[in-house]
Amino acid sequence: MAVAAKYVGTSVPRKEDPELLTGQAKYTDDFVVPGMLHMIVVRSPFAHARIGSVDVSKALAMDGVVAAFSGEDLAGDWAGPLLMAWAVTDDIHNPPHWPLTKDKARYQGDGVAVVVAESRAAATDGAEAVDVEYQALDAVVDMDAALADGAPLVHEDFGTNASYTWTLTNGEVDKVFAEAPVVVKERYVIQRAIPNAIEPRAILVQPNTAMGDFTMWSATQIPHIVKVAMTLGLGISESKLRVIAPRVGGGFGAKLQVYAEEMLALALAKRLGRPIKWVEERSENYLASHHGRDQIQEVELAADADGRIHGYRMKILANMGGYLMIITPGTPLLGAFLYCGCYGGEAYHFECTGVFTNTTPTDAYRGAGRPEATYAIERAIDALGRRVGKDAIAIRRLNFIPAFNEPTPMPGGLMLDSGDYDATLDQALELIGYDDLRAEQQARRERGDPKQLGIGFSTYLEMCGLAPSRVLSALKYAAGGWDAATIRLSPTGKVTVVVGTSPHGQGHATTFSQIAADDLGISVDDIEVVHGDTMLAPLGMDTYGSRSLAIGGVAVHRAAEKLVAKAKKIAAHELEVAEEDLDYEGGTFSVKGAPDKARTVAALAFSAWTAHNLPDGMEPGFEETAVYDPANFVFPYGAHICAVEVDTETGEVKVAKYVAVDDVGLVINPQIVEGQVVGGVIQGIAEALLEEAVYDENGQLLSSSMTNYEIPAASDVPSITIGRGPGLPSNSNELGVKGVGETGTIASPPAVLNAVIDALSVYGITDIGRPVTPERVWRAIRDAKGGAQ
Amino acid sequence: MSREPREVVLTVNGRRYSARAEPRTTLADFLRDSLGLTGTHLGCEHGVCGACTVLMDGRSVRACLLFAVQAEGHELTTVEGLAPEDGQLSSLQQAFHEKHALQCGFCTPGFLLSAAELLDLKPHPTEDEVRAWLSGNLCRCTGYQNIVDAVLLASSRREEGAR
């Protein structure tokens, strides 16, 4: 069935907004239940320290404090450690990760005790009274230092700080490199980032001791996975636990996690028989919610003398932090296939070593592995262009995989769905006014303007729609990548769409309503979308990896198709014709040649409810479920061009113009898609220019609050211009949709860096570290000019 | 310092409230926990993110940096008080809706109150003025563009001199 385009493709105003705009939306911290206790976690101030005695007696004596426990006290409560779902190799070093550590603190913020009290203030006071004996150890923060002989060991049992090495090889890599006339070698450092959802994490667990069951509200992206993890961690039956992700205030990957505090709150609710609430402080968010990125990349391209690429060879060090969390080791692998970007070639090698350090664990941050891959290739192709004397456009066009609309292989080994890389680049060049910009750049160079202009490109390719379950199995990920939808029509024709994805700002209720409304010929206003509740929506794999539309949206469409198929049988029966004699359009079945003989889907739902006159053998009721497991990923791509103005006297970088052309396949709601693009691009620009998690040599997080980790404000960032490219539908799914949640953070950092380097090329500068702070620019210019001025 | 709760009497969204608060209780916790007005959100509790912004006597304040007792006798406006009546949106809220100026919505109450203050003080600001004024509020979802557009749209719909 083709989607009739009444709603799909239009900017239906978001159904989510009214409660969010009026303060009526309920986030986890807004729920209050009688008898609720408040939990505070006592955290190690040391990045690496042996834990001696943990004395909670003073805390217990304080007003309002109900209970306090050390890691040893709770050791018997766990049926298993925190979930680590991606053992990427058979010989990976995967340490047990307990909700409270018992032996050592392995990063600043590692939980060592927990206090529960009648109020949050009393619990905070109690936590301060917990007396922990720490024996500080030498910490290791830097990855090269961690791999050196004699380095302090984060986990002594392994005898090394290396967790794993994972490799991928396609083609005759060594031969291609040996024979290539041009080999470009680059080294890039991707700094560590802190995701910073504005809503801190929060958890509330309500026990029902009589029945032995529990309800958990959690500010999470993944209620379904949290439920499974809690079952494994606490030995509670899955049928006794309901996990609800109510309104969730942003995630960006940091809420794609199973956290110690979820296990602790559930364990304490079970022990004490009282509801337990925990709300993260921002300082805890910086220390104890996972971080992202943090890689050192050795990048090599093998090419012809004219710059045509034949081989890719990548060697990555990825900082795991102190423990492996849900997909810590697998996060770099999400980019492993994409270090060739949208370019051709015959040989490809990727090698990644995960390294333990005394830092907060890393894990998925918006883009997860793909921003790192894109950064490497989009920087390196500019380096190749410089080497062979081609500009950023020519070197890209030379190497683009030619336009295609059917499954097409690429050097990383994936089968791409659809793409026209020249087309998005053409549109981006037009939108930014490229020739005028270059003329302006030339003029400024000629007059020695202190504010130099630079133009940078990122013609990116990403893979999303995570993920085909069989591929996940081959990559040793522990779960599947399917998702589910149930659609139900009430007797009066109102629709409930129950989905397994779990949004936190993406507008699923609106987008999924648009799909179902067109399929069923029903107004979007008559559709309610239910999500984020394992009781109401038991089937689901949640939201991450730009998967919700490409997997969950297709499931909605398939469930609707099943309902239409059932409706058609009832219609044929009631109208006394064969099914083949019916037309279906806009929610109405009509008899061919006799259009006045017709039934709407809503009317047929009523027939299915009364069950007075159904075809023989048909079950009453009007509800269908579809579970969709994709056969392939989807591959958004596009061209981003950034123009920066660099103040060569102060080192300040200002984004003067930014164009993002992203082909994300069929667009359901343009306004929502554009919102995702702009938000992602700004987040990526901030990563390029402002944001960095900085540790000192002792593992103390220096960028420990919003005052010294620079999240951009409205005045720090530009407006950007958006294009949609040719809009080639994906052939990985029948809707033709791709994903858009992460394109911005994937594409934009190298566009910004390349622009800065382009501006500084007048000084012969070809590399600069990120984030590109004024200090870095100023030092680079000073060094290029030959030391202190 | 005594922790004895004190009586706090104030006006919120035109309604008079009286409730007890420890001297160390922040205005944000008081609004949320004692008055049940959970539309005021806490993002950082150290005065950076602006999610807890409310108006006190018409001027924006960060509810996480004030104690409840400091609001004694003052008139507050929170996000719950912006709409003219239940089921309706203010012109600013409507503009946010139309321009898709919110995604997760967590920072939105703070932005609405900061923007409401701006439009009261300066009904027709420039884009740069809007960006500068809103720089005390952090949003991680939208990239700000649609928020700025929404404020400008609400501004364009205001009659000169109207509140």
Image: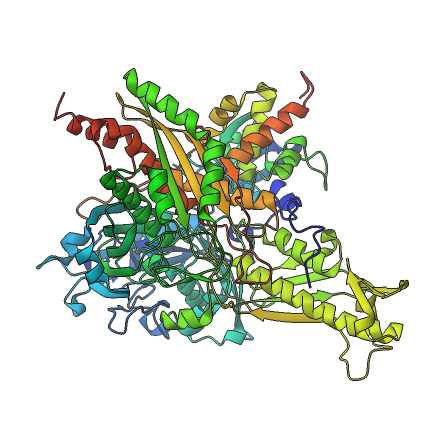
Above or below — where is A14 with respect to A161?
A: above
Q: Is residue B21 visible?
A: no
- Residue B21, horizontal then vertical, whole percent: 51, 40
Which residue sits at x=33%, y=19%? A444
Image quadrant where one finds the C terminus of chain A: top left
Give the colour scheme shown.
rainbow
Above or below — where is A264 with respect to A47?
A: below
Which residue sits at x=80%, y=74%? A579
Q: Quadrant of residue A712?
A: top left
- Residue A578, horizontal then vertical, whole percent: 83, 76
- Residue A239, horizontal then vertical, whole percent: 54, 75
Q: Is residue A404 visible?
A: yes
Which residue sits at x=54%, y=54%? A503
Image quadrant where one finds the N terminus of chain A: bottom right
- Residue found at the very far bottom of the displayed protein: A617
Above or below — where is A100 with respect to A667?
A: below
- Residue found at the very far left of the displayed protein: A150
How many numbered marks does the figure carry?
0
Give the side of residue A235 with respect to residue A292, left or right.
Answer: right
- Residue A629, horizontal then vertical, whole percent: 52, 69
Which residue sits at x=21%, y=46%? A186
